Amino acid sequence: MATGIRTKTLILLATAAILGGSLFLFEQQLPAPNAPSQQTKARLFSFQEADVTALKIVAPQYTLNLKKQKTGTWVIQREQEVPAEEGTVVFLLNLLTTGERDRSLDVPTNRAADYGLLPPMATLEMTLKDGTQHRLLLGNPTFDGRQLYAEIDPQPQPRDTMTVTLVPLDLKNAIERPLIEWERQPAPRSPEPSN
């Protein structure tokens, strides 16, 4: 009976050693956590945040025209210019200039609605200092809800195919906000001291 227990123990030890060795070899082949991945993601756009002079947002709730003044502050263009909430604008611009695009796939244009791109959930139009314009069409979230389908700088119509790209979900959060969050709110007044 003692030899039966020893045999089972030896088999378990050998199995554990084989599994441990296999796991060690597998982990040695993985890239280090801080090492850049072999597949580098491309940025959404190659321009810098400071290059953007105008931004137009067409969303279901509103259309918003933002313009950067010579002083560097942003205003909402209406009948009268209204100061824009700098944090809200900068947050969106930061996503546009530092956000990364993931996989892209070419699909027939007649499938645009499958990705929420006909009509798009939102359209962003950026104008740069040199007059160059860029467009970003945002569609539906992916099936796992972690990214959005988008079309970056779409080609003019007519066309047979379109390039659908996965972009950060944060872009949806950046534009789906009430109009009041785009406007700079006056600073609260401090109460008058009573005599």
Image (cartoon, helix red, strand yellow):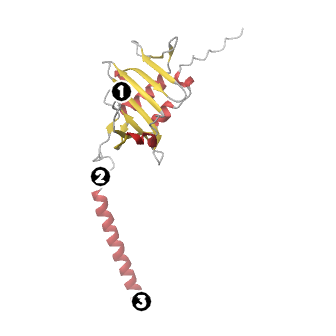
Q: Residue at x 33, y 26 (%)?
A: 48
Q: Quadrant of the N terminus?
A: bottom left
Give the image location of residue 178, x and y in percent: 56, 27
| Disc 2 to disc 1, C-alpha distance | 36 Å
The three-letter code of the residue at mark 1 reads His
In terms of sequence position, does the residue under pointer 3 or pointer 2 come before the other?
A: 3
Q: Which residue is mark 3?
A: 2
Between circles 1 and 3, the one closer to the viewer is 1
The residue indicated by pointer 2 is 31
Asked where in the image residue 165 lies, by quadrant, the reply is top left
Q: Is residue 63 above or below residue 19?
A: above
Q: Quadrant of residue 2?
A: bottom left
Q: Residue furthest top?
A: 195
Say whether residue 68 is left or right of residue 78. Answer: left
Mark 1 or 3, nearer chain start: 3
Question: Mark 1 highlights which residue?
Answer: 134
Residue 174 falls left or right of residue 49? right
